[in-house]
Amino acid sequence: MMQMSKMIRGALAALSFSAVTLGTLSTQAADPVRLVGFDSLPMSAIVDGNKLTGPGYEFVADLFKSAGVPFVAEGQSPLRIAESLDAGNTVAVYFIRTPDRETRFTWIGGLIEDDGFAFITLSRNPKIDSFDQAKSLKSIGVISSDAVKNILIGQGITALDPSPSSVQNAKKLLAGRFDAWFSTINVARYWIKQEGAEANTITVGKTLVPAAGWITASKSLPAETVTKLQTALATAKADGRYAAFRAQIN
């Protein structure tokens, strides 16, 4: 009888351990994906601490919902995005696809594949299609980013007028406070539109530095999740939701 009692207690303990283990695995499997973005309108913006908003975020969040993929959104600094992707179970709303990042991350789909840096001028001024042309300008607006400024400095262009935000650069361009604005095309168009100016108020020069922005995932994100999101993106492009998103930012 005593031996039988021990056997029963052992079986119950084993069952209890299995239940706990299965419960833990189930919880891990159900962990929502972290959807991260940084302060970079029109792609995303951080409000009220670390909450995300903006046209790009809203579009990607809708893809998650239509795909049935649970997520938790979180605003981060640009420098943390790559670290979060490396840590796993993360998708970035918008990340520039470059050769050195190609095998490091999983690329779900292009959010704005046709973007890039160009010189933006007022329509009444000459169009700037090259760095050599830009060398003759007295002042060029640029975001206060070493990476962006170094693109121009590397081309021998030093007459820079940096501002901490794109909205300030849009205001300065429209006021004629510098000759051209060196910016990604979609950011420039978005902020010019936000200032109430017509699209034909500005002229966009030739794309000089490609900057394709992609919805980007951790390399370890399950293939099933990646496929669900890619299918949701294809559906959004087919039913007009992607076109509506582009209309918001162009």
Image: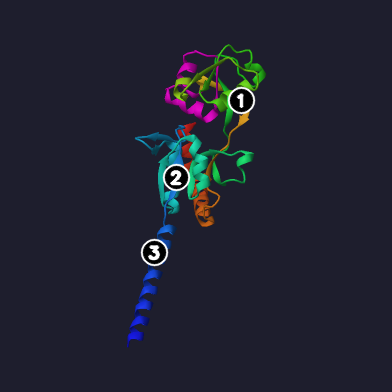
Q: Which mark is in front, 1 or 3?
A: 3
Q: Is residue 100 magenta?
A: no
- Vertical comparison of 104 with 7: above or below: above
Task: Measure the alpha-carbon separation of dots 2 and 1.
Answer: 30 Å
Q: Which residue carries the number 2 mark?
A: 35
Q: Is residue 175 magenta?
A: yes
**Residue 228 percent location from the top left of the image:** 50, 54
**Residue 208 percent location from the top left of the image:** 63, 27
* Residue 217 visible in this rendered orientation of the protein: no
- Residue in the image at 45% along x and 42% along y: 36
Circle nearer the N terminus (1, 3)? 3
Dot 3: few (<14), some (14–19), or many (≥20) neighbours within 10 Å? few
Q: Secondary structure at mark 2?
A: strand
Observer-nearest of 93 and 204: 93
Write down the region rendered in magenta: 170-199
Q: Amino acid at mark 3?
A: Gly
Q: Which residue carries the number 1 mark?
A: 151
**Residue 162 percent location from the top left of the image:** 51, 19
